[in-house]
Image: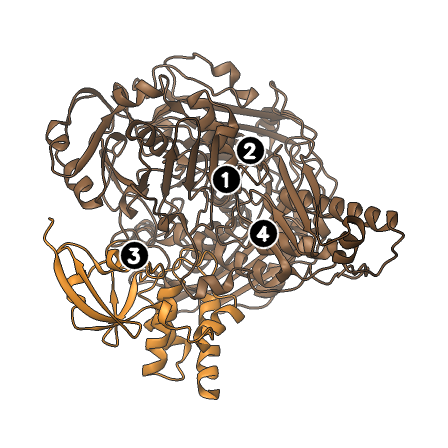
Chain colours: A brown, B orange
Amino acid sequence: MGNTSESLKEVGQSLPRKESRYKVTGQTEYTHHVKLPGMLIGKIFRSTVAHGKILSIDTSQAKSYPGVFAVYTADDIKTIIPDPYYGPAFLDQPILAIGKVHFVGEPVAIVLAEDPHIAENAAQLIIAEYEELPAVYDEVEAMTSDVIVHNELKPSGTFPDLKHLHGKKDTNIALDYHLKRGNPQAIFDSADHVFEHTYHTQQVMHTPLEQMVSVADAQHDKITIYTASQSPSFVRLEIARLLGWRENQIRVKVPHLGGGFGAKLYIKLEALVVATSMLTKRPVKISLTMEEQFYTITKHPTTFKIKSAVSKEGKILARRCDVYWNGGAYADIGPRVTQKSGFTAAGPYDIDHVEIDSYALYTNRPPSGALRGFGIPQLVWAYESHTDEIARSLNIDPLEIRRKNILKEGRPQATGTLMKGAEIEKVLESVAEKIGWDKPFDKGTGIIRRGRGIAVAFKAAVAPTTSIAIVTINADGSCILSMSSVDMGQASDTSMAQIVAEVLGVKTAAVKVSNPDTDMTPYDMATLGSRSVYHMGKAVKLAAEDAKNRLEKMATDMQMTAPYHFRDVFIKHYGMQAGSIVGYGSFIPTYTSPDKKDGSTLNATPFWMAGATGVELSIDTETGHITIDRLINVVDCGNPINPEIVQTQISGAAIMQLGFSLTEKMNLDSGQVTNASFADYKIPGFNDIPLVMENEAVKAYQIDGPFGAKGVGESATFGVSPAIANAIEDAVGVRINELPMTPELIFMAMRKAQNKS
Amino acid sequence: MNQLIPIQFKLNGTVIQTEVQPHQNIIELLNKLHLKGARESCGQGLCGTCTVIVNGTAVSGCLEFAKSLDQTDVRTIEGMEVNGVLDPIQESFIETGAFQCGFCTPGFILMTEQLLDKIPNPTDEEIRHYLSGNLCRCATYPEILKAVHLAAKKRVAK
């Protein structure tokens, strides 16, 4: 202990996850397992229509079912929370439906009983009558539809750029972000070539294996919430706001999560368990089934119209992007996704004339939110498919056209912010080298045809967001890191402990990490968008340095000189093994909001992420079946805190995106999800993994990151879908412009092409 | 619904006498007995998160009635660690970093044991095939593949 060596000892080591032993022995405490004395279980009665006025809700049979404790509707909720609407961007979502339902699956009533089976049976006895209204499901239709999902828009006040939408009527547009740089129209009018394509993405769900689950224990003037949430600080803030209570009356405790991926952000079940616990004066737990998760939060379906003016040499001169985000019935964080991803919709290219219009739309689908990439994978799907289509039309090599246009260090990106510290070129070149782009490639001549494709992408990290950390040194020299970052499998506990250990000169294994408990752990915006390593990592480093400085000052005051054992400093100062040292660290990056007129900002983000993908695949031309032979993902995550965990993050993200690329799609029929189960909704299993996977974090250093690090959870999702589409066209000459790229779709495209020729 | 059925079975070597309701599944019973390793996730026997070993065979605990355990020998993840010493399979999962959130991990470890009991030194192909009934949404499959190979080696060494 007390080691002050310059070379890094803990950071940069591939240490196993701190909680490893708990995970392999099945002892991890998830919210899934929380049981409290007297606890009631809630089962939700859900809407069967996509858009309708509620005429009546008959709960009488459910109430008289033996063993039922209570049945509630919005009328009951309103007795304790008069205005029960929540949401991070818009206060649009009621705890239980009020007056109207806006999507199939919307919670309408809740049954509470000690026995979950009783609650479930009784919920089926509730009868609701609706006057069905016309519904809108498509994001482009929603722009001009007569069907209006919400009568009036209610921005939450959290985001200044939503203020102008307050009280707006007769629209489904929950945010319109406009960016204009240069004079694209003039360029389009005079360019050698103009290309225009439209791409679509489908609705998918995160499907964390630990389903969404929350427990509330409400008492007279305080409430404890146990919840599988990625945003404990937000839950506290929002519940306090709903109740008109102080934040210190709400305690939110979050253990490890059984997966999150963006599903467990903001308010999901927390408001409902709080309200029903207050009404029943009993602890209440709600655990969703896998099916119910599909009706809770999903990934935005999108339509992206992209148009480029290109010189005959392949230089992109101007680009216009129209992006429509299908936000479903409630905005959730959709408006943020629309704006933040809007910044980079034109891709990692140096284009002088850019126009971006990005719209968040309400429809009568299940709500959409964040899913591993915060909108970026939907954009990359379009702009990197488009890049290859341009290259093919101009007979330019796909790698060459990217090299010709790539955004170089120090050049302004579409918003005007200078690109700094993103190894975009390096990740692209590394993929090209690994795949052997300049070497001959056997494309086959028989039934099986082979192809390869590449894609490169970047992301502006969401800003501005705050992280606070506390590092305590105990009198025996042991230390505790208290933070509200949520470890949902990405190993934040381990990497943050490595940072503390490095600063204090102790072993990572000896650093205890306190999981989020808002009474004990300080504020953190949320665990999302690959923000933790950079933001919380910096706060943690500052807190550890603060603790170290205090300890050193105490030692100096006692005329002690290093090396010394921490404990001896305490004994000397306090006369016995007593006392504590508390170090504090707080971090918020600088940020400049985009200009209202042209969407520009000189400071769009604290850091850029970069990722590139290379794919080799085989297609059975008789069936359209694809085999991914090789999947290469290269990212820039700065200097990895834990290299092996970074590798796992890269391959995990890529495989998840592989599911969204090839098999996953929520099928809707009149707003009803017809495949809301693993029987019909296919997530990747062992047999779906490419035979060869290569991952790399390029040598990089994020200049202001903690020990040069930055986030990595999403980077390998970016390029997977378009790299596959590009490889499909390379193999069989057809272009797929919608996801997922199923064998049927490929086969039909091939037949269509044959019929044409 | 309130009917109670007495059952007796062996759970990780200890004889358990208890009563279950006719509709309760194995996972509900294990939770009542304070075991947390087998977890219900998809609820349809398709993800393997609820895997338990009954009379030497892996079953989906979310699909089987608890009363079916009467007079059986049940093994769960909690039975793998002996006197504080981890099984070589558990060690291998740690050493190769073969999990992220850990929710599916007990199911994968129990199925790996079943696999290695049948095929002590499996090929990649055999591992993929045998573990294809278990799902990991974090997609830690490449690491699990390594873990199984390492476990096979460790078992031979033992």
Q: Nearer the viewer, residue A101 or A666?
A: A101
Question: Does label 4 or label 2 sit earlier along the sequence?
Answer: 2
Q: Nearer the viewer, mark 1 or mark 4?
A: 4
Q: Amino acid at mark 2?
A: Lys
Relative side of A268 to A412, left or right: left
Q: Is residue A345 above or below residue A159?
A: below
* Mark 4 or 2: the one toward you: 4
Q: Are marks 1 and 4 in contact (CB under 8 Å)?
A: no
CA distance separating discs 1 and 3: 36 Å
Q: Chain of mark 2?
A: A
User: Label 2 near label 3: C-beta < 8 Å?
Assistant: no
Q: Amino acid at mark 1?
A: Phe
Q: Is residue A461 above or below residue A102?
A: below
Q: Which residue is mark 1?
A: A374
Contact, CB < 8 Å: mark 2 with mark 1? Answer: yes
Residue found at x 55% / y 29% = A356
Pointers 1 and 3 within a single chain: no
Kindly identify which residue carries mark 2.
A340
Whether residue A594 sits left or right of residue A214 in the image: it is right
Q: Are marks 4 and 2 on the same chain?
A: yes
Query: Residue A513's mark?
Result: 4
Label 1: which secondary element: loop
- Same subunit, labels 2 and 1: the answer reads yes
How far apart marks 2 and 1 lie (CA) works out to 8 Å
Nearer-N-terminus badge (2/1): 2
Are discs 3 and 2 both within one chain? no
Quadrant, the N terminus of chain A: bottom right
> Most extreme residue toward the bottom, as rendered?
B157
| Mark 3 lies on residue | B31
Marks 3 and 2, how far apart at CA: 43 Å
